[in-house]
Amino acid sequence: METTITESRETLTAGTSMDETRGLTYPRIECKNINVSYGDKQAIFDISLPIPDRSVTALIGPSGCGKSTFLRCLNRMNDTIESCKVTGEIIMDGENINDPDIDPVLLRSRVGMVFQKPNPFPKSIFDNIAYGPRIHGLAETREDLDEMVEKSLRRAGLWEEVKDRLSSPGNSLSGGQQQRLCIARAIAVRPEVILMDEPCSALDPVATARIEELIDELRKRYCIVIVTHSMQQAARVSQRTAFFHLGELVEMGETDQIFTNPRERRTEDYITGRFG
Amino acid sequence: MTDAAPAPFRNEKALKRLKKRRAADMRFKFYGMSAIAFALAALSLLIISILSQAMSAATYHIVRYDVVLDPAVIAPPGKDKPADVARNIDGFYDLLRDNLLQTFPDVQGNRLETRQLGDLLTRLAVLPVAKSVAANPTQIGQEMTIKVPLNDDLDLYLKGAVSPEARLKLGAVEQGIETTPGRVTLSGANAFKGLQSLIAAQRAEVGDAVDARSILVTAGKSTGRVVSMSADALEMDLLTGSASDFNAARPLARVIALPESQRNVSDDQIAWTLALKDMGRISRVPHFSLLTHTDSTYPELAGALAAIVGSLLTMLVTAFIAIPVGIFASVYLEEFAPRNRLTEIIEVNINNLAAVPSIVFGLLGAAVFLGFFGLPRSAPLVGGLVLALLTLPTIIIASRAALKSVPPSIRAAALGVGASKMQSVFHHVLPVAGPGIFTGAILGMARALGETAPLLLIGMVAFVADVPTGPTDESTALPVLVYSWATHAERAWEPMTAAVIVILLMFLITMNGIVVFLRRRFERRW
Ligand SMILES: Nc1ncnc2c1ncn2[C@@H]1O[C@H](COP(=O)(O)OP(=O)(O)O)[C@@H](O)[C@H]1O
Ligand SMILES: [Mg+2]
């Protein structure tokens, strides 16, 4: 099973070859001295953060502290914001993905993203999943594609619910199903990293619980970074937690340690609900 | 327990406030409904007035001639090749006029009347007949039934549009006697009492002016103009037919309000037309030639075909230029262009361009396309180019609005799965914005279809006798045809103009129908 995902891939920069096979390298992503500013306003100050593979890293902190901004650095979605300027190094598989030579389109096929509000394409369920594999040429035949769609939907725990209505529109699903569809869509392009920006904030508690179960399942295969405003959620799903405040990384560590025995005063104040 | 009891819902003050609020609601509703009623009334008035005018142009009168295609007249020796026959308008005209002269033999020798009788038939109206005979020369020498439109003024007379006319069935006439040549006396007890009182009533209304009115009395194929009358006898000039037709008949009297000197149709012409009608040679038929003929100086021969084809060709050129350029410009501006001073200036100027009066585009077109590039005058190519410039801002603005309304989350989703910017736009944004873009494009085209001023300036107002076959042929367009027909003096052009307006409106309604269909069919709900 594993090999299907780790089969040989293009390298991010043309010319260099990647001989490292995918293993339990630690850390999967190494961020060094990241600074982000929107125009004159700096949103992130000198953040260095290692992100381990096959585990969930939660980013917590009060709103506006730069969690989303930091997350968007990891697949260079900040490139699409004109005023946004990112400096620093983000090393993934030995390459600095922040390098101008890196093709962000290729990067995004290896670093998938799930957004705050479920945003399926206004197309059928099947086409939602198949779109990524199609543009990346991952499926040779129609059968390949069918299989890929099924596998992605199964991994996202949605297959049983939608297998009879693959041709109905993606937005006809419920909110929770739509979000799982978006996760399936991200999985379909065989990423190694999945970024999730408050994926449950628009969902009811039952749908949230399903997504959390799914995240726990997915962590066996992927490196997951999740932004959440719910500390309970962070405690439930993540193995490591990073606490952001006013654009700075205040503290990071094992989730258990952060929630039971924070080293920093600000972290303690936040997780005990004294501000935020 | 010391809390004050809550105020009841129905206290006086609350009721008063409620009443006031309801009154304000009602007033607002009333204003809104009056505004809509006013708009609807204005619109229906417009449509009713155009339709009622156009209705009379929907049919017209044609005259049937049973003639022998005499080779001596239509294909005299030396001019008997098909090409000559096709051009022999004079010959065919003579053939049909001679037929009329035979039908009304008493005209012979009177030059004025001969000319007037000949005017029942328009010379150029025989052209299609000449062409069809030339195409099939075995018909020469044979008997043939030819149908040709009636002169437009007499057509209008038969449609009741020339003058108000009072009609009265007279009492039984015992006999009509020709006393002196051309003068007939009708007699019958009390037969003309009704007519006398009708004239008396009209005299009370308009005074002596009634004496200038023509009173025509018709029985069968015969018609006379009243000279004098009493209750039992009536004296009249016989215009056509014979006195014996009045024996034991109950003739019909027509009092034509407009004096003969102020009409384009003489009493004689009316008499002949009535006689032809009585013979069953005049019939009212649908006016298809309005759609199959090209322009003419004679309203009964004129049609809008050249203008319809010209408009279609012009719209084709406009669509081929304005729609792709408009879509690409708006996609670039909305999705790819950096937000800076330059794009801001471009944006403001596009909005300004949309407000430039159309005649300015006409001047620009004349100067640039005709003057500088030397393109042909009066051509749909140039018209289409000018109209494309005119509609471009409209299409760009509408397309940008459609692109703006696509939720940004769609773009993020596409980029998130590794689509390039281009792919996200072409695979996801454009399909969602498509119906809105096409709505804008078609509305822009509809505006272009109705434009007149710029086309006048590039010479598309020229008289065009041939259907254009390509975008560089000389041509005109529907709104320009409306303009040029509306400036003609003859009355018969009025309903023709209205009919062209109706054709133009049909085009517009079809285009707007397509818009509604697109919206219904493809618009996605979010
Ligand atoms: N597109 C943007 N343009 C300008 N400023 C932005 C933009 N996105 C975020 N910011 C600013 O950056 C800071 C961090 O925002 P964000 O990363 O969204 O915070 P969080 O996700 O933690 O709530 C905020 O002060 C916000 O105002
Ligand atoms: Mg956020």
Image (tube, rainbow, N blue to C red):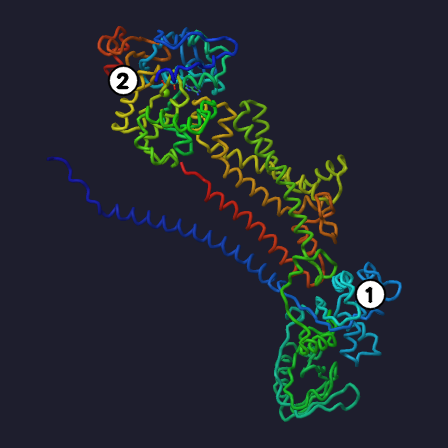
Which chain is home to disc 2?
A: A
Quadrant where the C terminus of chain B sits is top left
**How many C-alpha atoms fall within 10 Å of the one at disc 1: few (<14), some, or many (≥20)?**
some
Q: Is residue B240 above or below residue B479?
A: below
**How many C-alpha atoms fall within 10 Å of the one at disc 2: few (<14), some, or many (≥20)?**
many
Q: What secondary structure is marked by label 1?
A: helix
Q: Which residue is mark 1?
A: B90
Residue A60 visible in the picture: no
Tell whether B263 sits left or right of A64.
Answer: right
Q: Is residue A246 above or below residue B444?
A: above
Q: Position of residue B255 (x, y in %)?
A: 66, 78
Q: Is residue A154 above or below residue B496?
A: above
What's the distance in space between the residues labelled 1 and 2, CA to CA? Answer: 100 Å
Indicate the quadrant where residue B279 lies: bottom right
Q: Nearer the viewer, residue B175 or B290?
A: B290
Residue flagged by tag 1: what amino acid is it? Asp
Q: Quadrant of ligand 2?
A: top left
Q: Position of residue B515 (x, y in %)?
A: 51, 45
Q: Which residue is mark 2?
A: A237
Residue flagged by tag 2: what amino acid is it? Val
